[in-house]
Amino acid sequence: MLINPIFDRHAGLLGSNCLKKLQRSSVLIAGLGGLGSTVAQLLVRTGIGTLHIVDHDTVEESNLNRQLLYTSKDIGKPKVEIAKKRLAEISAHTKVMPHKVKIDANFDMPDVDVIVDCLDSFSDRFILDEMAEEADIPLVHGGVARFHGQVTVIRYGLTQTLREIFEAVEDSGPVPVYPPLVVAVASIQASETVKLLCGMGENLINRLLIVDMLNNTFDVIDL
Amino acid sequence: MDERRDTDRGETKGTGNRIKIEFFATLRLVLGVAGLEIEADGPVTVRQLISIASEKLGTDISAKLMDGDKIKRGTMILVNGKNIHHLNGLDTLVKPGDRVAVFPPAGGG
């Protein structure tokens, strides 16, 4: 297999079988804010074949502290359009499919191998969780607030659903968030996605990782 | 009953006749402790456990974790990895050897 030079520095690490699997894989990123921006870039740079990106919002000035796909020139423009353009500039290897919609009961879930939850409210996440469960597609959850965040991988039938784990959690509106924490949690989500697709290492299945960047702790709770 | 401040994050469950309580993220800052172990001869409810922990820590953590008779908004309590909303809420029984995790779920993206 001829390796695209973009992947030279990780091809030997992941192996050609993994790269082939990534090339054949399709991932949906729900939400293109702080988490989604970094997850999308990392998956493109790692060599995912097809990426569905879903967000109904436009870029706002207050996004620029942590949403690494956008610049001040993008204010007011749809996130999915800017993201598609910028991701194509990084690599033409990935086919990027933009969906400028909010994920709700009317969303037509494409046939993907993994869904990455980069949404910004639990109420929206619970809708995504129901859709992912119905389609039986693994879900890589991430959430951030202040200096901490959490990641877990949902495999329907093998783990609790996101709704079960976070039952009764209520949203409290936008919370302050530490930009480096957002990128760290997104990096872990991207890594969990690659590992799921390649069957590599140990995933956060039935385990909840809590990252606290203020105290430099990574704790895992068995679920 | 006795308590031991927890600095060892390697253990995953309370040991022997101890119930292990762990706090995460901002709760560690607010409560000023990462966790503790409480010795118990038999099952206690989560509500009782919070009360015992308050006594041992010398500070009323129930005000930080509970809002009257309910779990405080923005706080999640897992007993052996299960959200107590699926069990019996604050009346969920916790046995020696169990692990209780308390944290503020992060909702942003």
Image: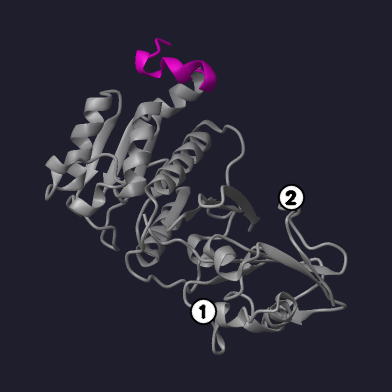
In this view, the residue in front, A194 or A38, is: A38
Name the spot of residue A66 as percent of width and height, x first: 32, 46
Which disc number belongs to residue B10?
2
Q: Main secondary structure of the magenta part?
A: helix
In this view, the residue in front, A183 or A88, is: A183
Give me the chain letter of mark 1. B
Give me the chain letter of mark 2. B
Q: Amino acid at mark 1?
A: Lys
- Please check the rendered image and state whether residue B27 is part of the magenta-colored stretch, yes or no: no
Residue identifier under label 1: B72
Which quarter of the image is occupied by the C terminus of chain B?
Answer: bottom left
Name the spot of residue B64 as percent of width and height, x first: 55, 78
Residue A103 found in image quarter: bottom left
* Region rendered in magenta: A1-15
Any part of residue A92 in sight: yes
Residue drawn at (40%, 43%), measured in percent from left and top? Answer: A183
